C-alpha cells in the first residue's frame, strides 16, 4: 500500500467521506465560477478595455457623459470609467486578447480570492481550509461582469497574510480602488501606485471631475448602501472613520476585520462582490475571537467564579 492509501485508511471511513465531500465542494465551486465567467456579459471588463483603448489612443478614459452628473451604475459596457488613472497601466494586458481573455481574468479573480480564503484559515487544518475554499467559490463575486472586486479582495487578504510582498498586491489593487492601500503595512509597496499615478498625472483632474459627478443610482440589484439608505454620502465616511479608529486600537486580526468593514462603508452603490473584503476580514478574525473567548473563560474559572466553582460552594 502506498503512503497515501495508508493515511486514508487511518482516518477511517468517516474521514474518507469528509475528504471526498470537501473535494467535491471545491470542484463544484470551481465549476460554478468557471460557468459564471463563461456565460457572463463581462460588462465591467469591457469598460476597462474600452477605457484603456481610449487612453492608449491619446484620449481620456473618462467620457463626456461623466463631465456632468450621472449615476455610477450607468457607465458599464464602455460608457464610462470611474477608477483612478493609476489603474490604466495595470489593465493594459486585458487589451491583448479578446473575449476569452476577459473571461479568464474574471475566473482568475474568483480563484484567487478562494485561495486567499483558504490561506486565511490554513492553521485550523487542511479540512477547514478546503471548506473555506469551497464555500468562498460559491459566494457572489460579480464574476459574470468581470468586476475587479475579487482581485481587489485577494490583494487585501494577501497584505494581511504576508505584510511585505502581500502589501505590493494590496498597493497594486489600490491603483484600481484607493481603499486597499489602507491594508498596506510595508510602506515601500506604495511606490507602485505612486509611480503609476505620476505616469498618468495628466488625467487626475478628469478623474476628480468624473468622481465628483458620480452619484449612487441605488439599482434594485445592488445591496442597500448607507448612501442609498440615508440619501447622503457623509454617513458612510463618518462610520468608516469610527471603524478605522477601532481597527487601530484592536488586536491585529480583529483590527483587520474592522478595517475591511471600514473599506466598504463609504461605497455609493454596494455591489455584492464588495462583501468579499469584510468576508476575508472575518475569516482572519474568527480564530482570534474564539481564542479570546476561551481565554476569558479560563481566567474567569481560575478566579474561582466559574460555574463549577460556584456549584462547589453551594450548601450540600
Image: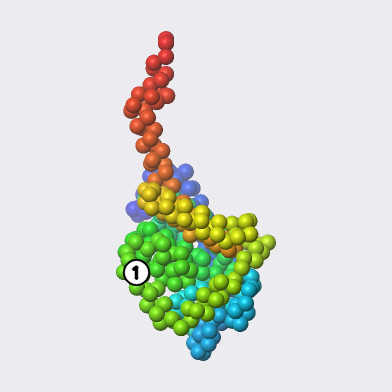
Residue that appears at 53% across and 87% down:
59
At which x and y percent is residue 209? 55, 76
Instruction: Give the image location of residue 280, x and y in percent.
Output: 46, 56
Comparing 224 with 286, the one in front is 224
Residue 225 percent across, percent down from the top left: 59, 58
Q: Using the image, determine if residue 138 lies above or below residue 106.
A: above
Which residue is the extreme one toward the right?
A: 220
**Whether residue 316 is situated above or below residue 115 in the rendered picture:** above
Q: How crowded is mark 1: few (under 14 residues within 10 Å), some or many (20 or more)?
A: many
| Above/below status of 315 relative to 185 | above
Q: Which residue is drawn at 56% across and 71% down?
A: 212
Front residue of this view, candidates 91 and 110: 91
Q: In the rendered image, is residue 26 in sight?
A: no
Residue picked out by circle 1? 189
Residue at the image position 39 percent from the left and 48 percent from the top? 250
Q: In the image as oriented, which residue stretches furthest toward the top?
A: 316
Query: Residue 200 or 46: which is nearer the viewer?
Result: 200
Task: Indicate left or right for 253 with 263 as reference.
Answer: left
Give the residue at x 44% y 55%.
244
**Along the horizontal axis of the image, is 305 left or right of 85?**
left
Element under disc 1: helix
Q: In this view, does 207 lie above or below 267?
A: below
Question: Can the viewer see residue 209 in this picture?
Answer: yes
Image quadrant where one finds the C terminus: top left
Amino acid at each position: 500500500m502506498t503512503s497515501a492509501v495508508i493515511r486514508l485508511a487511518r482516518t477511517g471511513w468517516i474521514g474518507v467521506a469528509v475528504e471526498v465531500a470537501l473535494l467535491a465542494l471545491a470542484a463544484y465551486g470551481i465549476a460554478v465560477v468557471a460557468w459564471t465567467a463563461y456565460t457572463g456579459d463581462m460588462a465591467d471588463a469591457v469598460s476597462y478595455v474600452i477605457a484603456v483603448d481610449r487612453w492608449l489612443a491619446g484620449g481620456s478614459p473618462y467620457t463626456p457623459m461623466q463631465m456632468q452628473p450621472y449615476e455610477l451604475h450607468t457607465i458599464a459596457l464602455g460608457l464610462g470609467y470611474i477608477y483612478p488613472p493609476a489603474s490604466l497601466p495595470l489593465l493594459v494586458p486585458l487589451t491583448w486578447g479578446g473575449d476569452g481573455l476577459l473571461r479568464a481574468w474574471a475566473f482568475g479573480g474568483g480563484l484567487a480570492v478562494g485561495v486567499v480564503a483558504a490561506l486565511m484559515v490554513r492553521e485550523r487544518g487542511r479540512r477547514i481550509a478546503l471548506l473555506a475554499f469551497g464555500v468562498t467559490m460559491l459566494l457572489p463575486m460579480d464574476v459574470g461582469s468581470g468586476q475587479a472586486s475579487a482581485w481587489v479582495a485577494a490583494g487585501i487578504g494577501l497584505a494581511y497574510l504576508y505584510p511585505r510582498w502581500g502589501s505590493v498586491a494590496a498597493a497594486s489593487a489600490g491603483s484600481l480602488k484607493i481603499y486597499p492601500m489602507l491594508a498596506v503595512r510595508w510602506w515601500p509597496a506604495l511606490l507602485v501606485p505612486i509611480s503609476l499615478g505620476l505616469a498618468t498625472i495628466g488625467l487626475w483632474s478628469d478623474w476628480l471631475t468624473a468622481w465628483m459627478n458620480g452619484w449612487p443610482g441605488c439599482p434594485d440589484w445592488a445591496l442597500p448602501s448607507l448612501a442609498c439608505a440615508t440619501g447622503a454620502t457623509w454617513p458612510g465616511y463618518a462610520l468608516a472613520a469610527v471603524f478605522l479608529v477601532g481597527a487601530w486600537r484592536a488586536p491585529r486580526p480583529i483590527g483587520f476585520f474592522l478595517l475591511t468593514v471600514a473599506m466598504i462603508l463609504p461605497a455609493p452603490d454596494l455591489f455584492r462582490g464588495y462583501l468579499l473584503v469584510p468576508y476575508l476580514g472575518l475569516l482572519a478574525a474568527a480564530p482570534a475571537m474564539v481564542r479570546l473567548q476561551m481565554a476569558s473563560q479560563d481566567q474567569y474559572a481560575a478566579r474561582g467564579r466559574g460555574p463549577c466553582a460556584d456549584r462547589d460552594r453551594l450548601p450540600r
